[in-house]
């Protein structure tokens, strides 16, 4: 019996490779987002600790250090805001890549469904062909038996 050959198999293979690459890129982007969130949290914690340390100082030292600490806190706040803007960009990119991955997944599932339908149709045709061959063989065997019986009766 011949093997099943589906003409769109190459397209399905390429789609699988693209989906795998998209999944890997999405995973890398998710890790970058997690790292950016950790950096933001560390900056916010540093700013909070800086302000808490200032608040814990006696009034005379607090007044003397307040200008320096506030400038440092402002600088940290600007860094955190810049990181949050980068995070927002990464989140938007992740959303786009997720949509692209879902589109690839949908395309792959459609191709797999078409392949399964084509295989089922091919299998049915092979079964019909096999049954036809068996019927033909049985008919030939029956005809031979009948001719041998009629030859014996003469």
Image (cartoon, rainbow, N blue to C red):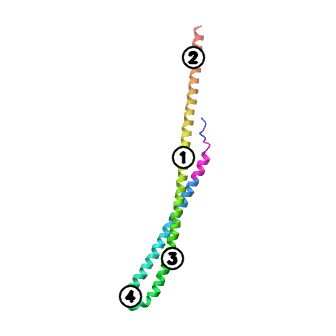
Residue 57 vs 6, above or below: the answer is below
Q: Closer to the N terminus: mark 3 or mark 2?
A: 3
Q: Which of pointers 3 and 1 lies earlier in the amino acid sequence?
A: 3
- Residue 50 is situated, as x and y percent measured from the top left of the image, at 43, 82
Which residue is drawn at the image coordinates 51% and 70% (left, top)?
85
Q: Which residue bears the numbered disc 2?
A: 145
- Residue labelled with disc 1: 110
Give the mark toward the camera: 3 or 2. 3
User: How far separated are the C-alphas under marks 3 and 2?
Assistant: 96 Å
State the residue position of label 4: 57
Q: 147 or 48: nearer the eye? A: 48
In space, the residues marked 4 and 1 are separated at their CA atoms by 67 Å
Residue 55 shown in magenta: no
Most prominent secondary structure in the magenta stretch? helix
Sequence order check, earlier mark of 2 and 1: 1
Tell me the element at label 1.
helix
Disc 3 crowd rating (10 Å Cα; few below 14, some 14-19, many 20+) is some
Q: What range of the chain is rendered magenta?
A: 6-16
What kind of element bears circle 3? helix
């Amino acid at each position: 019996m011949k093997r099943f050959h589906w003409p769109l198999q190459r397209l399905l293979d390429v789609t699988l490779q693209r989906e795998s690459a998209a999944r890997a890129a999405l995973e890398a982007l998710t890790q970058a987002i997690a790292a950016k969130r950790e950096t933001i949290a560390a900056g916010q914690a540093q700013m909070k600790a800086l302000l808490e340390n200032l608040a814990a100082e006696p009034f005379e030292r607090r007044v003397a250090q307040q200008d320096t600490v506030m400038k440092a806190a402002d600088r940290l706040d600007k860094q955190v805001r810049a990181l949050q803007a980068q995070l927002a960009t990464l989140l938007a990119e992740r959303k786009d890549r997720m949509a692209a991955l879902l589109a690839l997944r949908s395309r792959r599932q459609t191709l797999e469904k078409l392949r399964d339908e084509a295989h089922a149709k091919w299998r049915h045709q092979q079964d019909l062909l096999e049954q036809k061959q068996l019927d033909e063989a049985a008919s030939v065997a029956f005809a031979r038996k009948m001719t041998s019986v009629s030859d014996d009766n003469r």
